[in-house]
């Protein structure tokens, strides 16, 4: 019986994939949303244009939206300035004719009914391709193996006929139609759809009904949803982010209602801890964006396994490096490297340059080395090393000769968890003076990040050796920090 069930699952998956491939033949491009650190949207947009060839890129607060051809979809994995990626299922603009009135008291009921009105097929196909998910997605109440107008796959209890799909698949199903397959209720880790900010660890043997979810059902005899073992549907959760005043609902209520519509309509299993699919609901005033997450964790954490008191996200490090306009053969230095976020990202993204880093704290070089070894083992599979040397030194007295460094990039101590505001008044001017001595005269660059804007402003303006070209204000850990792009003068 076990092998029969596995065989049926394999047949259903083949039919589902073949159906979706045919449905996707006419789809040329898909809408993508990428979240970025607030203030670095322009840098992320430039990377998308350079690596993906995107022309029309819309920027929002902490987000960018762009179209990408389906044949270039997997190149999304090459983006390093973004933190999260998701496929846009539907976007309702505030000024559009089909826009939402999020101040309407019936908005929650509309959110509950919305999943059935959306076209999910292209977004889910691209999600399956990106994640390598091999399971089935849909099972509707008709129980007939078919791709309906929405691209849903359904299973027939008896008869084994197939309206669409390969003939071989239909014949295989007919051969097995007489074999008894025991239907079993599939367990669900969460008994209901809790609020988005809460997790429910209780276990139940059946999926919740619409009554258990706190949503209105059109049927008075609603029964708990059942999932056959031969067609295990994906687990999901809904995450809602909301910005705006005078909304008549909370983010948790919106997530619960929208998730209830998905659960009742598609039969997907609720799992807040380990979902296969994370559906995103982003609401800004009366604008609503529905998407499917492509990334499970922030891409900003990709390089660091050994953490210190302050660790810079790899995505922010990449943006800082991009602002430095690094060229092949340049010598790049981070004189206050901490855990190594900047030099590791620099070595991975600009391997044709040479990279140096160091720190005054005795634990920092060892931590950086441990992170380098972790990257070499996991990302490079021990096939090559990084072009990076690590030292312990004092940024105010670097053991380097004059004009030996092309680019300085560093995350300066903010004076909160690292260093102090009082010490920064002495540290910043001395560090800038020493970096100016070592940096190439007339062509050298420096990209420095700090939250202590008062001290930085005085240090830069009192120096004749550095000229400020650009300042980008970003949100980092709830703090407003500045990225200062400097060039070395000829003095």
Image (cartoon, rainbow, N blue to C red):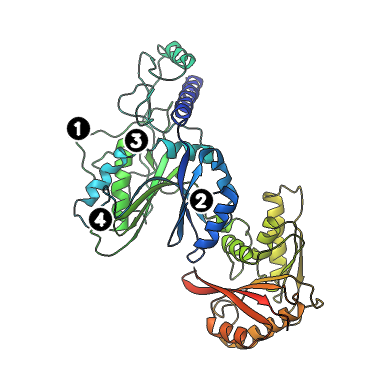
Q: Earlier in the sequence, mark 1 or mark 2?
A: 2
Q: CA distance from mark 4 to mark 3?
A: 27 Å
Q: Cβ–Cβ below 8 Å for labels 1 and 2?
A: no
Q: CA distance from mark 1 to mark 3?
A: 17 Å
Residue 326 falls in image quadrant: bottom right
Q: Earlier in the sequence, mark 2 or mark 3?
A: 2
Q: CA distance from mark 1 to mark 2?
A: 52 Å
| Quadrant position of the C terminus in the picture | bottom right
Q: In the displayed structure, would residue 318 be above or below residue 261?
A: below
Q: CA distance from mark 1 to mark 4?
A: 31 Å
Q: Residue at x 24, y 64 (%)?
A: 246
Q: Which residue is mark 1?
A: 221
Please tell me whether mark 4 sits on a helix, a strand or a loop. loop
Query: On the picture, is 358 further left or further right than 304?
Result: right
- The tag on residue 140 is none
- Mark 4 or 3, closer to the camera: 4
Q: Which residue is mark 3?
A: 267
Q: In the displayed structure, would residue 488 be above or below residue 262?
A: below
Report x, y in % for residue 373: 72, 56
Report x, y in % for residue 450: 57, 76
Q: Nearer the viewer, residue 245 or 406?
A: 406
Q: Nearer the viewer, residue 418 or 83?
A: 83
Q: Residues within 10 Å of mark 3 (few under 14, many from 20)?
A: many
Q: Nearer the viewer, residue 221 or 168?
A: 168
Q: Which residue is mark 4?
A: 102
Q: Earlier in the sequence, mark 1 or mark 4?
A: 4
Report x, y in % for residue 49: 55, 53
Query: On the picture, is 189 further left or further right than 372?
Result: left
- Mark 2 or 3, closer to the camera: 2
Q: Which residue is mark 2?
A: 55
């Amino acid at each position: 019986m076990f092998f029969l069930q596995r065989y049926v699952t394999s047949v259903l998956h083949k039919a589902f994939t073949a159906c979706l491939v045919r449905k996707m033949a006419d789809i040329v491009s898909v809408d993508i949303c990428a979240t970025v650190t607030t203030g670095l949207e322009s840098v992320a947009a430039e990377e998308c244009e350079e690596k993906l060839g995107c022309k029309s890129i819309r920027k929002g607060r902490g987000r960018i939206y762009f179209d990408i051809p389906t044949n270039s979809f997997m190149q999304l994995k090459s983006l390093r300035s973004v933190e999260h990626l998701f496929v846009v299922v539907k976007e309702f603009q505030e000024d559009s004719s089909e826009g939402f009135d999020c101040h309407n008291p019936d908005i929650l009921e509309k959110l509950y009914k919305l999943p059935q009105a959306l076209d999910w097929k292209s977004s889910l196909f691209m999600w399956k391709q990106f994640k390598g998910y091999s399971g089935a997605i849909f099972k509707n109440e008709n129980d007939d193996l078919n791709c309906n107008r929405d691209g849903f796959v359904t299973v027939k209890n008896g008869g084994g006929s197939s309206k669409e799909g390969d003939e071989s698949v239909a014949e295989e199903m007919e051969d097995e139609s007489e074999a008894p397959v025991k239907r079993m209720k599939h367990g669900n880790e969460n008994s209901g759809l809790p609020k988005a900010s809460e997790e429910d660890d209780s276990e139940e043997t059946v999926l919740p009904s619409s009554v258990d979810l706190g949503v209105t059902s059109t049927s008075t005899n609603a029964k708990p949803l059942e999932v056959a073992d031969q067609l295990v549907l994906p687990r999901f959760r809904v995450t809602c982010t909301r910005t705006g005043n005078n909304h008549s609902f909370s983010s948790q209520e919106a997530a619960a209602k929208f998730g209830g519509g998905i659960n009742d309509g598609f039969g997907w299993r609720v799992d807040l801890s380990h979902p296969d699919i994370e559906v995103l609901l982003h609401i800004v005033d009366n604008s609503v964006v529905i998407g499917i997450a492509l990334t499970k964790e922030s891409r900003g954490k990709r390089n660091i396994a050994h953490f210190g008191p302050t660790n810079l996200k790899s995505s922010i490090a990449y943006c800082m490096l991009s602002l430095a306009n690094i060229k092949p053969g340049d010598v790049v230095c981070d004189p206050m490297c901490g855990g190594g976020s900047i030099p590791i990202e620099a070595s991975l993204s600009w391997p044709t340059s040479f990279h140096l880093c160091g720190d005054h704290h005795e634990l920092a070089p060892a931590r950086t080395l441990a992170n380098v070894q972790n990257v070499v083992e996991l990302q490079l599979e021990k096939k090559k090393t990084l072009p990076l040397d690590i030292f312990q030194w004092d940024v105010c007295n670097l053991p380097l000769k004059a004009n030996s460094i092309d680019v300085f990039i560093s995350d300066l101590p903010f004076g909160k968890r690292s260093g102090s505001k009082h010490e920064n008044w002495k540290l910043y001017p001395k560090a800038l003076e020493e970096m100016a001595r070592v940096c190439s005269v007339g062509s050298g660059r420096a990209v420095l990040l700090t939250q202590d804007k008062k001290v930085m402003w005085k240090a830069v303006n009192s120096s004749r050796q550095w000229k400020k070209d650009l300042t980008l204000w970003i949100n980092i850990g709830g703090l407003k920090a500045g990225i200062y792009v400097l060039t070395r003068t000829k003095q």
